[in-house]
Image (tube, rainbow, N blue to C red):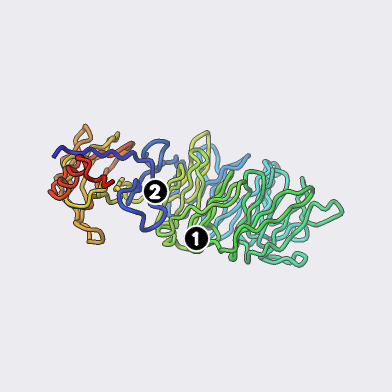
Amino acid sequence: MKAIRKTYALDQGLMPVKNVPTSGKWLKQASGVRKGLSGLEMEAVPTYPLSVSVSWPWPQIVNLTSEVIVIQSDGLYTVDGTWSLTSLVSSSVDDSTMWQFADFGDIWFATNGSVVYKRDIEAGTISATDSTEFPQVTSLVAFKKGQLVGAGVQSSWYDCDAEYAVWGNIGSETFVPDWKNEAGYRHMGIGTIYRCLGLADQAVVFYGSEGVAMLTPAGATFSYQLLSKIPVLGKNAMGGQAEHLYISSEGKLYRISTEGREILGYQSYLSELSSSLGRILYDPIREDYHITDGSLGYIYANKQLTEATRFATQLCVYDDELVGAFEDNSGTIEIQLQEHDSNLVGMKSIEFLEFGLKTDGTVTAAVDFSYQLGQEERESTWKPVNNSGFVYAGVTANLLSPKLRVSDPSEFKLDYITYSLKVTDNRIQNQLQAMSDGSWNVN
């Protein structure tokens, strides 16, 4: 029988839910790549200008308006034009801590979860804030570049505690409520608040141990909206700017935008992340999200999830380039299609595989196969792919799952996978012949 050619454009990533039907376009594996506008691309490799060795999650680089800050486990450092470090403040923290900054140009504030520091760049000073004017909060943002908003109050501040949000007067460093009715505070009803993040300068979203809530400007104050009563995974399991991604305690990925909240899925992957170390880091150049706990890593790009082999500690933009520290894993790219029976139940053979591939790495391919649904898969011999992207597979089974491995690449782009399928089961050939005679139409 004549061979059937099947081509799969790689426009989807990992399966967002378990138990999807066979012969779909999802990937069983997509390691070391991100989803591009078309096909799969090599994961980003940012510039790393420091001479400091990387041991996840340190160091972290943050580019503020007027200076670059390097974060180590023992405190904050500034850098000069040669990226040499100068100690700014000593503050020992554990690996689960992520500093948060509220940037107002020559003045910025930073919290490590227990102490808030104020930095005056022109004066060359940094010190803990005055607790009579400024509550000690676990999280802090500069909202619309003119108002401080915080959450998780740790100090004595009116009747507030870790379940409260606080906000200051516009254009002021004080949180003390007064006759202007700008500064204020509110119980958010989501348990202990881990983090707050500005959402496209339109709102501030609060993530807590018992849910997610949002404050939106309403006149001189804020209006309240409860978004979810499902807890978040941990204190750093959220990130973004114009929109946010966050992970729930169940391991499900969610998106929050100005249009609302949406479930994305991927529980089978993200539920394995550490609740204390898991974090989401935003790539402002590609608008990707890097999700990692230092042992596992994923990339959410162009609305698809893939697996990372480099685990980010932090990401920022410096001189129009992505800058950050990554702890490398193997760097090997591995791609595998979901199981396919091509809607033909019975034996069929993959003869040739063709890859729409551009890379300088060493490329090999194989096929996982089984004879019936639910049976343990076997693996064919790995064979080298030639410079034209072809390889002879020579595998016969019912369910077939082609896969590709690229070692030591410095560039990579994969647009499609095509395989030549030949039916070998006489029962299928008879069925196809009957269908071609029109006998399938019983009416």
Residue holding disc 2 = 306
> Distance between the Cα atoms at labels 1 and 2?
25 Å
The answer to which quarter of the image holds residue 153 is bottom right
Mark 2 and mark 1 in contact (Cβ < 8 Å)? no
> Dot 2 surroundings within 10 Å: few (below 14), some, or many (20 or more)?
many
Residue holding disc 1 = 95
**Residue drawn at 19 percent across, 40 percent down:** 437
**Residue drawn at 79 percent across, 47 percent down:** 219
**Residue drawn at 62 percent across, 51 percent down:** 197
Under circle 2, the secondary element is strand
Q: Could you tell me residue 355's position as x and y percent? A: 26, 37
Q: Is residue 342 above or below residue 134?
A: above
Q: Could you tell me residue 139's position as x and y percent? A: 63, 57
Q: Could you tell me residue 192's position as x and y percent? A: 62, 65
**206 relative to 283 in the view: left or right:** right
Q: Amino acid at mark 2?
A: Thr
Which one is in front, 373 or 394? 373
Look at the image and tell me in which quarter the N terminus lies.
top left
Which one is in front, 258 or 175? 258
Of pointers 1 and 2, the one earlier in the residue sequence: 1
Give the residue at the far right of this rendering.
Answer: 179
